[in-house]
Image (tube, rainbow, N blue to C red):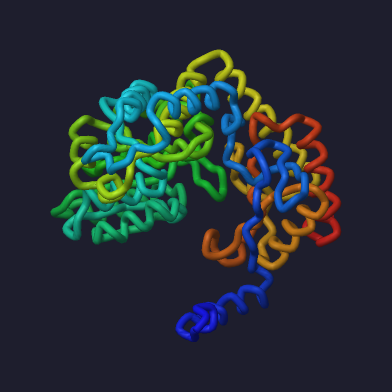
Amino acid sequence: MNAAARPQLSFLQQQIDEMKAKGVFFRLRVLEGEQKAIANFDGKEVINLGSNNYLGLTTHRALRRAALEAIRRYGVGAGAVRTIAGTMRPHAELEEQIARFKGTEACVVFQSGFEANAGTVAAILSKEDLIISDELNHASIIDGCRLSKAAIRVFKHRDIADCERLCQETANWSGHKLLITDGVFSMDGDIAPLPQLCDLAEKYNCIMMVDDAHASGVLGRSGRGTVDHLGCHGRVDIQVGTLSKAIGAMGGYICGSRVLIEYLHHRARPFLFSTGHPPSVIASCQAAFTLLDSPEGERLIKKLWANTEFFQKRLRKMGFSTGSSQTPITPILVGEAAKAFEFSRLLFEAGVFAPAVGFPTVPQGKARLRAMVTAAHKRADLERACETMGTVGRSLAIVS
């Protein structure tokens, strides 16, 4: 019998049919060639506003050279989990390099930022403990909180008063307490009030943890993140970063005290049960961090912010709402999910790739396009993208 004809999963087809009826079903767009500012998706050349490639490093010559040299020297794979035979010299060197970059004692690299978040929270906490979490924290934080079996209290987004209310209500909690936030929120592009959250963590004896995935390579000196940007060095116990966005490769990491990192070596399940990164990926990341601390890295970050300012100002002038974004993440708020997906589809046909985002990634009624500006975009690219968005937005009555 053909597996496709078996009835056991027919309920999934019913849910897919419901998505189609609501206008929110999508198929994966396939990138033909390199991840660039102008890219070919599904055989069509478009202005690419869908990538997290903030600094354009996915195709940088220094990263390519480093990857090729690592393959020649070390082969194509680690061949084992890190705790058995899969920790190669480049893994150790990259972790030392990141720890220096972030100003911490130590670092451990995970296979993804999602695993870094989820694996760390689940490893350090148990059912006797408490987590106080921003309501818009990333899904990897939410999953890690659930896996830990700790009690969870959620405060209103970036609301210090509400966070302190929860801290006061749980001041006598007998177990460990973790206060956790994104540094930059991935769907809205706003920045956490980190100094005030650190004040609360210190006042109420909480472990302080920040997911800096979208701040890495974007905020702070040479892209050191929100801890550096907001002057919170020494006040954050656990810093999460990514190698998959501005760094241009793949993976995630945790920075903190040496005792934290050594504990994660023994208890973080994604680290314990996943093969180490290929040497080529590790070498690419090393090259990226070296570049960040160079004049070229400084130039790329400045270009990223100049492009962001131009793009967001132009969109707002045309009447689009970009929400509360303070970073290159640019939400273009639509509201109705079906209209957001139609907006994205028509833009793609007109030569602009800006993905739509709806529930459950964002709350019901808050669907949007999520446009990502990079240092690799030319001013002419962004001008053309804005003109196209204006034309299509007016046709859908999103703007007048």
Image-based side of 116 in relation to 30, left or right: left
From this viewpoint, which residue is outermost toward the top? 295
Residue at the spot x=57%, y=41% of the render? 52
Looking at the image, is 88 positioned above or below residue 30? above
Image-based side of 174 in relation to 368, left or right: left
Say which of 285 and 177 sits in front: 285
From this viewpoint, which residue is outermost toward the bottom? 7
Where residue 210 sits in the image (x, y, percent)? Answer: 37, 40
Residue at the spot x=42%, y=26% of the render? 228
Q: Quick check: can you spot residue 229?
A: no
Looking at the image, is 152 positioned above or below residue 31? below
Where residue 144 sits in the image (x, y, percent)? Answer: 33, 54
Say which of 347 and 390 sits in front: 347
Say which of 45 and 383 sits in front: 45
Where residue 107 sits in the image (x, y, percent)? Answer: 30, 31
Residue at the spot x=32%, y=41% of the render? 79
Looking at the image, is 209 positioned above or below residue 398? above
Q: What is the count of numbered marks? A: 0
Say which of 88 and 60 sits in front: 88
Image-based side of 340 in relation to 167, left or right: right
Q: Quick check: can you spot residue 379?
A: yes
Where residue 41 sits in the image (x, y, percent)? Answer: 70, 49
Q: In which quadrant is the C terminus drawn? A: bottom right
Q: Image quarter for residue 230?
A: top left
